[in-house]
Amino acid sequence: MHLISAICAAVTESAANLDVVSEGWWVPILGTIVTVVAAVLTWTLKRFASYIITKMKANDAEKEAIQCLLEGMALAQEGFVREAKAASEDGKLKKDEIEKAKAMAIEHAKSIAKGPAKDLLLVMGKERLGSLIKQLLAKLTSKKEDK
């Protein structure tokens, strides 16, 4: 035990002689640490802002694509669906007529869309766009029933 105390005293004395354990040793590196932390924080905030801007643009493109689909659906309704329902005995569309109406809506939407909305419509397949049309029709008919 006495040996450990002697070693500790010797280390403390030699450290004091070398001026390693001075009170302000951290002051010179504090500026560097603050600069690095500020740079990392700035970089992180720029990345986050870029992500938010990209996400907002994507949402705008999705909204525009949906608007184009709705316009295409309205065109198909006016130009084809009403006539096909009137010509049908039971007033309902057959599967091939439904597919034709979907294709008309999709083609019209692709023809009027521009920029990112057009790119989005071109990337989505017919099945996905058909599913989206089905969802939009369900929302539209539920709104009509609520009125």
Image: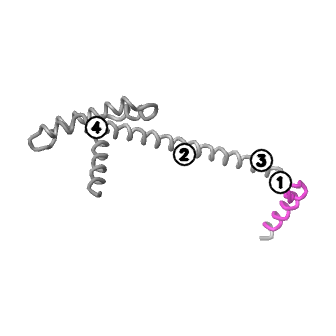
Q: Earlier in the sequence, mark 1 or mark 3?
A: 1
Q: Which residues are magenta?
A: 4-24
For mark 1, what is the residue?
A: 27
Type of amino acid at the residue the image marks with label 1: Val
Horizontal and vertical percent position of residue 103: 26, 33
For mark 2, what is the residue?
A: 52
Q: Residue furthest left?
A: 89
Compute the Cα span from label 3 to label 2.
30 Å
Q: Earlier in the sequence, mark 3 or mark 2?
A: 3
For mark 3, what is the residue?
A: 32
Determine contact: label 1, label 3, CB under 8 Å: no
For mark 4, what is the residue?
A: 127
Q: Secondary structure at mark 1?
A: helix
> Image check: 88 left or right of 123?
left
Type of amino acid at the residue the image marks with label 4: Glu
> Which label lies toward us, 4 or 1?
4
> Image check: 56 left or right of 72?
right
> Image check: 14 left or right of 50?
right
Type of amino acid at the residue the image marks with label 2: Ile
